[in-house]
Amino acid sequence: MHRKAFTALLGATVLTLALGACSDTADQPGSGASGGSGKQPYVALISKGFRHQFWQAVKAGAEQAGKEFNVKVTFEGAQEEGNVEQQIQLLQTVIDKHPDAIGFAAIDSQAAGPLMQQAKSQKIPVIAFDSGVDSDVPITTASTDNLAAAAEAAKHMADKIGHEGKIALVIHDQTSVTGVQRRDGFVDYMKKNEPKIQIVDTQYSGDPLKATDLAKAMITANPDLKGIYGSNEGAAIGVVHAVQEKGMNGKLTVVGFDSGKDQIDAIKAGNMAGAITQNPVGIGYETVKAAVAVIKGQKVEKTIDTGFYWYDKTNIDDPKISAVLYQ
């Protein structure tokens, strides 16, 4: 065979093998235009929101794990936590990039069902975080035990109001697992342990402005109200503002959930009795850590409890507490 002909044949053979290898790789989990199959695995996180300090802390934890485990991490969330449509669009865009794994905190635990199946069919492992998904696709969920945490909030509310009287709830939503569990954990504790406490109203909004209006209406309708529970950062701060605007500081007990700067300031100022803080940095970190384990073919627990703490004026400066407050 002539030298030129041999060289041409060799080049064609190498090209054919390369194309075949690319085709094989495209069928593997985590391969795609985003470069998920390269030297650095790619883990994409889609959260409920982006603006609240809680989500920024989750993002920080995810990025910390990304550096530690040498994986590319992206973090996106809906501009408004209730915007299910935008979150689904973000999730579809991420699936189309075919990352090595996806972390997902669902606004609506059922709405993402079809896309969960799409991720499964494309062999993209899903790690749920903060809020579970109504699907058997996620391999694990990294989150706070919200039922237990809400029960702890209820216990402290009962103590603060003397174990009797009327209270109300402002819950951030009624579609996510966190919303449902932070409501049910609180309500169930009161039903089982506090027969003299009456829950007179439950309203839904995680937007501070809307939560303020809801709480003001509750106070107007129930002038003998003794306490209001807000189930996330936005709901709790809305309640604080309502109490202030109605001139009820010191007369109405506010118990919250999460620990953004406004809540910390409210507790220090005596406008909020206390709140439950999660470990948002830990949630982000454990989500990426679990994703890396799954990518490597390692087993992970079905649930990863990232912990919670009650904090108030008495322990807010405790190093164990201050380490998980985000502001």
Image: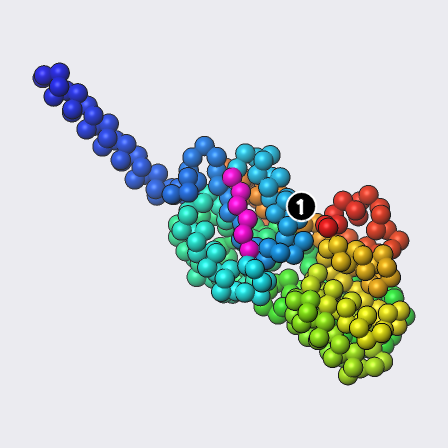
Q: Residue shown at 55%/48% (left/top)?
A: 75
Quadrant in which the N terminus is drawn: top left
Tell me if residue 301 comes above or below residue 11 in the rendering. below
Question: Seen from this angle, which residue lies furthest left?
Answer: 1
Q: Residue shown at 81%/67% (left/top)?
A: 254
Tell me if residue 73 comes above or below residue 203 in the rendering. above
Tell me if residue 305 comes above or below residue 164 in the rendering. above
Q: Residue shown at 57%/43% (left/top)?
A: 288
Is 281 part of what is drawn in magenta? no
Of residues 1 and 34, the one drawn nearer to the viewer in this rendering = 34
Of residues 223 and 121, the one drawn nearer to the viewer in this rendering = 223
Please say which color scheme the image uses.
rainbow
Q: Is residue 148 visible?
A: no
Instruction: Give how far across and how far down residue 5 sits, in percent.
Output: 11, 21
Residue placed under numbered mark 1 in the picture = 282
Is 75 part of what is drawn in magenta? yes
Predominant SS along the magenta part: strand
- Relative side of 7 to 42, left or right: left
Three-letter code, disc 1:
Gly
Q: Is residue 76 visible?
A: yes
Instruction: Give how far across and how far down residue 27 sits, in percent.
Output: 35, 43
- Relative side of 113 to 11, left or right: right
**SS assignment at label 1:** helix
Instruction: Give how far across and how far down residue 71 sits, in percent.
Output: 52, 37
Instruction: Give how far across and how far down residue 199 sits, in percent.
Output: 77, 76
Quadrant housing residue 247: bottom right
Q: How many marks?
A: 1
Q: Which residues are magenta?
A: 72-77
Quadrant housing residue 26: top left
Question: Seen from this angle, which residue lies furthest bottom?
Answer: 221
- Relative side of 304 to 251, left or right: left
